[in-house]
Amino acid sequence: QLSLRLSSAAAYVEPGDRLADIGSDHAYLPCAIVSKDPTVFAIAGEVVDGPFQAAKNQVQRLGLTDQISVRLGDGLEVLSSKDEVSVITICGMGGSLIASILDNGFNKGHLTGAERLVLQPNVGERTLREWLVNHQYSVISEEIIEENDKIYELMVAKKVPSKKITATETDLTFGFYLKDEQSAAFKKKWQRELEKNQYILNSLTKSSTDQQAKIKQFQAEIQKIEEVLK
Ligand code: SAM
């Protein structure tokens, strides 16, 4: 049984897809997808030996070795053009790590631009959106998920080379669609951020040293969040 976070990502994998799950850990995501839909072929990539072995064991135990290729390597370097990957999932890492995996893949020619990207950053969503926009990716879908009192974002992106992709500062920080949808999880996430910022601002104003620059920065951040939370 997949977590809600991973099953939400799995929902963007389609019949007949050739999936690369990067940072697969125990390969739970590709195993669940392929067990349910035998038309999907998957590659599970891992850079650390322990999780790589765990992924291999899991795939073997479930008898899925014909459908899932478990590979040890850094990011998208485990892929070759012969794999004809149609969808890449990268879940459960920071947004800046996901962006750097995509960036290395892009620079080394492992990212063709034909793949659908299903990305689930735990933090650092803004950095990831910025990378996508700067590399001609259009975010086609976004979700915000609450599970075990944690809030996760999920985004799906597709490269659109012919179109100029633009994003406002608000889009990058709060999401292209999430800020308009204003779901309960979205409100909770940004209410928490607001409180964190207010707490810091409060301690800064009490500080004996001059904190004007920092105070201004936190005031601006608080204002930005208050404007989005309706
Ligand atoms: N994707 C799974 C999930 O969402 O539950 C596992 C997330 S786990 C927190 C992150 C995994 O990514 C770890 O197993 C880690 O070894 C792996 N990882 C980190 N950097 C990586 C990289 N550059 N290439 C491949 N795997 C990486």
Image (tube, rainbow, N blue to C red):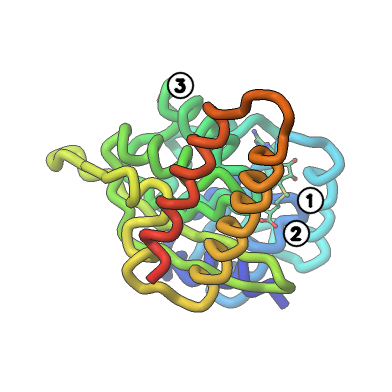
Q: Is residue 115 left or right of residue 71?
A: left
Residues 65 and 126: in front is: 126
The three-letter amino acid code for the residue at tag 1 is: Lys
The three-letter amino acid code for the residue at tag 2 is: Val
- Whether tag 1 and tag 2 are in contact, CB under 8 A, the answer is yes
| Label 1, residues with CA under 10 Å away: few <14, some 14-19, many ≥20 | many
Residue of label 1 = 56
In the picture, which quadrant includes the C terminus? Answer: bottom left
- Whether tag 1 and tag 3 are in contact, CB under 8 A, the answer is no
Residues 2 and 52: in front is: 2
Residue of label 2 = 59
Q: Is residue 48 left or right of residue 214?
A: right
The three-letter amino acid code for the residue at tag 3 is: Lys
Provide the secondary structure element on which disc 2 rests.
helix
Provide the secondary structure element on which disc 3 rests.
loop
Mark yes or no: residue 102 visible. yes
Provide the secondary structure element on which disc 1 rests.
helix
- Residue 87, how many percent across, how many down? 44, 53
In the picture, which quadrant includes the N terminus? Answer: bottom right
Whole-number angstrom distance, CA of label 1 to CA of label 3: 26 Å
Residue of label 3 = 108
